[in-house]
Amino acid sequence: MDFINCFQSNCESCIFKAMEKSGSVKKGIFYILVSAFGFSVMNLCVTLAGDLPTFQKALFRNGGAMILALILFIRSGDKPDLKPGDLGLLLVRALLGSVGVFANFYALDHMMISDASMLNKLAPFFTLILSAIFLKEKSSWKQYLFVILAFAGMLFIVKPQMEFTESMGASIIGVIGGFGAGAAYTCVRGLGKRGMPSSQIVFGFSLISTLIGIPFVIADHAAMSVKQIIILLIASVGATLGQFGVTWAYREAPSREISIFDYFTVIFSALWGFLFLRQIPDPISCIGYVIIFASAYMMFLYNRKH
């Protein structure tokens, strides 16, 4: 009888844990989709803002995100927590993240938003490589094979030629944006392992990147209409939603369970590009999309299994 009661108790405990895990994964998927939607809105607004200097657009994005992050940081009740070495790593994260933002915004100004968004989504593959180098995280040969496959897909979007063109230059800068984002995510992983609160990481990045952008905007800025200001404010809201959506998602579920849904940013961006800008990717770029998405999906399946 005691055995039966014990067995029943263990079964109920397993079922409860499975349901709890399932609920957390569903929440994680929901938050990552919210993040993808937020970043896609930011991408659209950057393009709709028109012919403004890249750093001026980025300043609105970073400044608005800084204010919203500060409000959320205060309301969260988290206290500033800096251990020895944290400030240096946070500064590196902010510098690399700023490179990622500025490069991504430049690419959005000179490419279709779906192309620029997909190049920015090379970030997880860069994170894998950099985490292995700097955080000593082990990766298998299959994971590196998926990275090579993703970079092969990138070539279909960049379309390298013997003669350097403006579009190819924008594509290369888009890849640099993906590298900056991937390097920044590596620093975020390091800060997370050191116990720094997520709200503090987001606020620190937004503050430093805003300060970096101010001198460039002073040197090169343009007058804005009320419509452009509203559009860029919406971009700030979308960016903040995207940043915190990612944070909330990875609190609920591990990367192996939800990372693939982050690629909905590209799907949303392609939809907005068609509806608002009448942009249709060419067949060669679509092949690149499929290759990169396929490599990301295989990486997702591999991570879940291992």
Image (cartoon, rainbow, N blue to C red):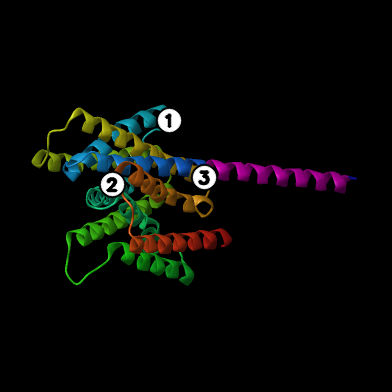
Q: Are marks 1 and 3 in contact (CB under 8 Å)?
A: no
Amino acid type shown at disc 3: Ile
> Is 153 on the left-hand or right-hand side of 55?
right
Residue 4 left/right relative to 77: right
Residue 74 visible in the displayed image: yes
Q: Residues within 10 Å of mark 3 (few under 14, many from 20)?
A: many
Q: In what quadrant of the picture does the N terminus appear? A: top right
Query: Which residue is denoted by mark 3 in the rendering?
Result: 29
Residue 77 visible to an observer of this rendering: no
Q: Position of residue 34 (x, y in %)?
A: 45, 40
Front-lying residue, 54 or 114 = 114
* Image coordinates for residue 119, horizontal then vertical, percent: 33, 57
The residue wearing badge 1 is 76
Q: Is residue 7 left or right of residue 293?
A: right
Image coordinates for residue 32, horizontal then vertical, percent: 46, 44
Q: Upstream in the sequence, badge 1 or badge 2?
A: 1
Q: Which residues are the magenta region?
A: 2-29
